[in-house]
Image: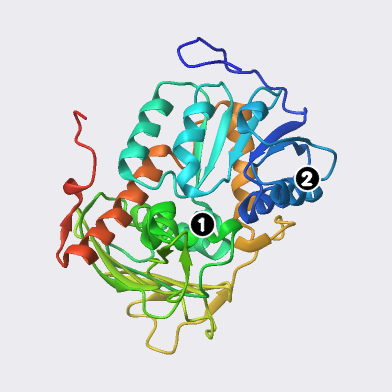
Amino acid sequence: MVRAGQPFHSRVFRMDEDFRYGIIGTGMMGVEHIENINAIPGAGVAAISDPFAGSRETGAAAVDGDPLVFEDHRDLLEQDLDAVVLASPNMTHIEILRDVLATDMAVLVEKPLCTTVQDCAEVVTLADQRDALVWVGLEYRYMPPVASLIEELHRGTTGNIHMISIREHRFPFLDKVGNWNRLSANTGGTLVEKCCHFFDLMNLLSGANPTRVMASGGQDVNHLDETYNGQPSDILDNAYVIVEYDNGVRAMLDLCMFAEATHNQEEISIIGDKGKLEALIPENRLYVGRRGEHWIGGVEGQIISDDSIPYEGQHHGSSFVEHTRFIEAVRTGSAPEITVHDGLLSVAIGAAAHRSIDERRPVDMAEVLPSPTA
């Protein structure tokens, strides 16, 4: 393994050779990545690591083949691998990334990049100092109805956009090893852990920089009677977040995590002076409404599917698409489609939203983002 401060040379790929992954963290999301990789021709999981025996056993059983199994991620990084996926608990990302980014391996980091803006900024610095690819796993961009919505936006269907609205009404946080996700200190807080996906989409759709965040939220239903090592669960289970952008676009998130009695989990809409786009998930329907042509109740939706996705998994095929694009970028030496800078900004909006809730005031992004000279 190449250590920090040592020079390294990026690998030259033959396009027909197998792509060897290592998976760091084989809990629920690690296994999800394994199952997606199993479905990609020419790719496979060669090694896994996890400090918990049960997770190692589950991860190894999910692999198509006989992977090397390690307790310590540093042993995995000594192996002959083409890329690693970091899917360990959020609060471990910064320490593990310091080791991963000292190698010449490409890495796909599960969201959120880190739990704090400060740690994300450190990762950005480390990533900018190396040649190997660093890709942040904000895969919601690749859900077929969302991808189609983005394509329609780029066609100019909405005209000049003014409003973005994202609603997620879903189930509570799932059980994980030790229920580490019940404490904000471990996750970065709900609006970082869960909602960085949506803030990334807002940034992408607006095509602008966020300037101010206003939020209201609380923990009203879920995990109220749970404690961990004497600490009560402090995870928000509902919130409204408004984000303002420097081009005048306003975006809103409506989050509820005790709303599993619903038809669609996610509803994403973009409204401009010429029309409205709306994607519904898991209905997987896209509505394209044009002012002057359509009226309320008269917009016909289209079911969006992608027959090229053989494995849908937990995220409607988006993780499969992400891995195929990640592999292509590594093999061709292309830039990542989702950068560490994207990862930092998605975390920073979540951090600003939490500060807005805690301090009951609007928060300028300049208050949470690292200064240009930092």
Tell me if I can see residue 214 in this picture.
Answer: no
Q: How far across and down, in percent of the image, does residue 261 sit? A: 53, 86
Q: How far across and down, in percent of the image, does residue 189 sit? A: 38, 59
Left or right, 103 with respect to 154, comes to right
Q: How far across and down, in percent of the image, does residue 62 sit? A: 78, 50
Colouring used for the render: rainbow
Residue drawn at (77%, 28%) of the image: 16
- Tell me the residue that label 1 is attached to: 180
Q: Nearer the viewer, residue 173 or 246?
A: 173
Left or right, 57 with respect to 158, comes to right
Looking at the rendered structure, the secondary structure element under dot 1 is helix
Left or right, 352 with respect to 258, comes to left
Check disc 1 and give the amino acid type: Trp
Q: Nearer the viewer, residue 82 or 247?
A: 82
Tell me if I can see residue 150 in this picture.
Answer: yes
Q: How far across and down, in percent of the image, does residue 31 sit? A: 69, 52
Instruction: State the residue lying farthest toward the top.
Output: 7
Label 1 crowd bin: few (<14), some (14–19), many (20+), radius 10 Å: some
Instruction: State the residue lying farthest toward the right.
Output: 65
Left or right, 55 with respect to 196, comes to right
Check disc 2 and give the amino acid type: Ala
Q: Which mark is residue 60?
A: 2
Residue drawn at (32%, 56%) of the image: 350
How far apart are labels 1 and 2 at the CA level?
22 Å
Q: Nearer the viewer, residue 259 or 148?
A: 259
| Nearest-to-viewer mark from 1 and 2 | 1
